[in-house]
Each structure stands twice: as structure tokens, then as C-alpha cells.
Amino acid sequence: MTDRTRILLLLGPALLLVGGMVLSALGLALLRSLHLFPQLAPDLSAYVAVLGSPGFLAALALSTWIATVSTALAAGLALAIALLLRRGFPGLKVVSVLVQLNLTVPHVVGAVGILYLVSQSGAFARLAHAAGLIARPSEFPVLTQDPYAIGIILTYVWKEVPFITLILLAKLQTLGDGAEQVARSLGATGWQSFRLVLLPQLLPALAAASALVFAFAFGAYEIPLILGAHAPEALPVRAWRSFTDVDLSARPEAFAISVLVAALGAGLLWLYARLILPNRDRDAG
Amino acid sequence: MRAETLRLLAGLVVALALVLPLVPLAIWSVAHGWRFPDLLPQAWSGKAWALALSQRGGVLESFGLTLGIALATTALAALVGVPAGRALGLYQFRGKRAVLLLLLAPAILPGIALVLGLHDLFLRLGLVGSAGGVILAHLVPVLPYMTLVMAAVFTGFDTRIEAQARSLGAGPWRTFLTVTLPVILPGLLTGALFAFLVSWSQYLLTLAIGGGRVQTLPLVLYSYAAAGRNDVAGAIALIYLLPGVVILLFTARRITGHSVGLELRP
């Protein structure tokens, strides 16, 4: 058996199954969004309707806001925590176990937990009442089903900080602190050795992890379902609602949204590949 | 000394923040009514747990279904992902980058980008509404993790030990079981853990492909939470966390940041 045959046999099942399902799903969504079943001539009316609808634009803006803020907060906090954990402190073990525990928590559990924590009659509102800050639930700031999606962002930050932290810790482990010590011995301050030596080395891993978090926060359904407002609604919630609308004419619009999100995802995939996949693979033959 | 105290404090804050959202879930699960502004419930009750653990609540059945789907998905992912990881880890070939991107795509594409198209595909294949269809669909988000972990494992694999076994007369199956498998087993277990957890936490994909007829735990949890049964939702949430905790207890030492990093660096 030649290497070529062997590689084909080894990769075949995975490519057929997942590659097949992914490409068919994307292809079908594109065809359906263009009204190509049952018609034969492509029809862009779904895209015209979607791009011209205020509801879609508001949903797009909201999901972009959610994903951007969640990713920025999670990346910043994770960087701080990774640097903290790296130095070690009493109780490091407990924190490490909790970080790993958090990774196993399904998002839907986090969303319901955050709901019971920060809603107007939630645990924080009760603490505020006990402290004499509020008299009624309605006096507590609206953090769930709110226009700024604060509850949703809190859930993503809570779930994704440990994820990015572990990736950064893995990177820090492989880097060691030799380069920083050299910088310090050459007279760099602590901040300079972080900013000029450590951060540039961490950045590809941090950016790649952030791309994953952004894509997830942009495209997940159950978190905005539980914590989001009715209007504006997050893009995945809107897409699923159009898709399951009793009025079947809304379906092409749902597919158009999914195609637009896939295009954004392709951009993130490209970014991720540039950051993570070694370039030499391109020329390997 | 000051810096040390600061680190300890920061560590405490992080630890507290990590468990905080789980606290109200645990309290709700044993509360008998818990009205604003009570800091703690006035009365305690085991009713939510009794319902969640009874036949009539449907939670145990749903737990079994979710577990079965996650285990089947993991087994399928191993069956397909181990060979794929071997090809990606051991060989350099033309188009490797494209293959990696295609196999990686479902882990990076936002969920909603694929779910509607997959629903359309599965509808045409007659697979909507069955647990089998859900298992097949879960392979899409699960396989990237298994494949990438196995690719990393095989990158450091020495095929000469297999050649030695073969030259001593072992058949391909025996070589795999007695030589290859023991070497890749730790990595395979790591990949299986990721695969299990990814399938275990799927929501929209299960809702779409299951067509509402495959009621896994996240869907049941949401229906109770949406119906305002905070107590039952709390109990289900804790039950839903159980496998993750068990996995963590068994692997606390092995799952380090490093193995998580592998998943992202083919």
C-alpha cells in the first residue's frame, strides 16, 4: 500500500462524514436562501428582505456587541489570571480545580445560574435589599432581558475566562521564563519585559482562543434564549424563530441569516488558520 | 509579602466568581418557595429532588438518553477520529492544510451557521426526530476535538514499534491492540473526554435534529426554568453537572492546561 492510499483510507471516513455533512449543510443553506428549491432561477429576495429589515440589523448589532464585549473582557481577565496562576500562591490547587470544573459546566447551566444570580429578584438583588440599597426588585438594575445584554455577556465571560486561561497557561508552560529573565538582566522593568517580551509570544495563542470565543458568543442560541430580551433579540434566536415560524415564507430568510453568519465564520476560520496552522503545511507535498 | 497577599486575594476572588452562579441553583433545588427579599429560603424541601429523581419527572430517563447519545457520539468519533488523527499526525501531504481546515471548521463556525442547513439535510435523509440522527449530527461539533487531539498524539508516535511487532509475526489487529493502543491510550482518553463533554452540552443541534422528540437534559432543564419551576431547574442543573464532576475527579491529575492546549494546536 502506498502512503497516498493509506492516507486516503485513514482520512476517508472523517472527511466523508464531517466534511460531507458540513459542506452539504452549507450548500443546502445557500440553495434554500436563494429559493433554489423548488425554483431553478436564483432569487435574492430573502437577502434583500433580511438586509433591509430593521429587526435583522438590530439583531446583527446586538450579537456583534455581545461577542465583541464578551471576547474582550474574557481575554483581558484570562491574561491577568494566567499570569497570576503562573507565579503560584497558596490555594493555587483549589483555583485550578475550579477552573477545570467550570470548563465542564454546560452553557445552559451557566445561563440559568446567572439568571438566578443577577435578575431583579435574584441573589444579588436580595443582598442589595439586605444592605438597604433597594426596597423593591424593580429598583435593582435590569441585568437580564436588558437591551445591553449584560446577563448574556456575564455568562460568556464566566464560561470563557477559564477556557482562555488554560490555553494561556499551556503556552506559558512551553515558553518558560528564560526570555523574560534575560530581558530583566539587561535592565528591562517588569512592565517592559511583559509588554515587549512575554506578550508578543502569548499573542498568537490569545488571539486564536479569542477567535473561538467570538465565534461561539456570536452564534450560540441557548444563552440569549434564557437571558435575552424580546427586542432586540440575538441573531441566533432570530434565525431560529424565523426558521420555525408557522409562515413558511420566513424560512429562506432564516437560511439567508445562516449563510451570512457562515461568511463571518469563514473569516474567523481564516484568521484562526493564519494564527495557528503552521505555514509550511501549505507547501508540503 | 505585599504582592503575595495581593495574589492570594485575587485568587480568592477568582475562586469565588467561578462557583458563584452555581450557588443559587443549589439553594433553589432544596427551597420550599424562596421569595424576594429573603436571603435564604424560609422553609426547605426535598420536593424538587423527589420530582427530578422520580419516574414521572422524566429527568432520569432524559439523563440516560443524554448519556447514551454522548457515549455513542464519543465512540463513533474515536472510530473515525483515530485514523484521521493518524494521517494528520504522521504524514505530510498535499492539501493537508485544506483537510485540517475542513475538519476544524465545525469547531470554529458559529453554531447557527450550520444548524439550519444540517436540519434540511437530515430532513431529506429522514433522520430528523431520532436519537440516531442526533448522534450523527453531534459528530459534526465533536469530531474536530477528537481528530486534533489524536493528530497531536500521533505527531510524536514512533511507527517502528509497530514494524517490530509485525516482523515478529503479529497481525495488524494484534499489533494495534497490544502495541499501538497502549501508546495512544492517554491521548485517546483526553480526546474522548472532550468529545463526551461537547456532545453532553449540545442544545440547539439536539433541538433541531431531534425535532423536539429527543428530550436531552439541557432541553428539559430549559422547559422547567421557562415554566418558572426554579426549584426543579436547580435540581436538574446539578444532576446535569454530575458527569463533568465525575470526569474531573478521575482525571484531575491528567487534564492539565497542556492537554487542553493540544486541542487547539494541531
Image (tube, rainbow, N blue to C red):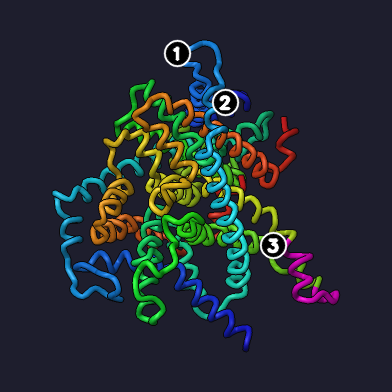
Q: Is residue B123 above or below residue A263?
A: above
* Marks 1 and 2 on same chain: yes
Percent across and percent down for residue B222 are 31, 50
Q: Which residue is label 3 attached to?
A: A175
Mark closer to the chain start, 3 or 2: 2
Query: In front of the other: label 1 or label 3?
Result: 1
Q: Is residue B53 visible?
A: yes
Name the amino acid type tagged 2.
Leu
User: Are there few (<14), some (14-19), or many (20+) residues within 10 Å of tag 1?
Assistant: few
Q: Is residue A53 magenta?
A: no
Give the CA separation, mark 3 to mark 2.
Answer: 36 Å
Name the amino acid type tagged 3.
Leu
Q: Is residue A123 above or below residue B163?
A: below
Percent across and percent down for residue A268 are 63, 42
In the picture, the disc for residue A8 is 2
Percent across and percent down for residue A104 are 42, 56
Query: What subunit carries mark 2?
Result: A
Residue visible at 62% across and 27% down? Answer: A3
Query: What subunit carries mark 1?
Result: A
Secondary element at image label 2: helix
Name the amino acid type tagged 1.
Pro
Q: Which residue is label 1 attached to?
A: A38
Q: Which region is colored magenta?
A: A184-199
Left or right: residue A150 compared with residue B98: left
* Along the line of sight, the residue nearer the viewer: A183 or A191: A191
Mark closer to the chain start, 1 or 3: 1
**Picture quarter with the C terminus of chain B:** top right
Mark closer to the chain start, 1 or 2: 2
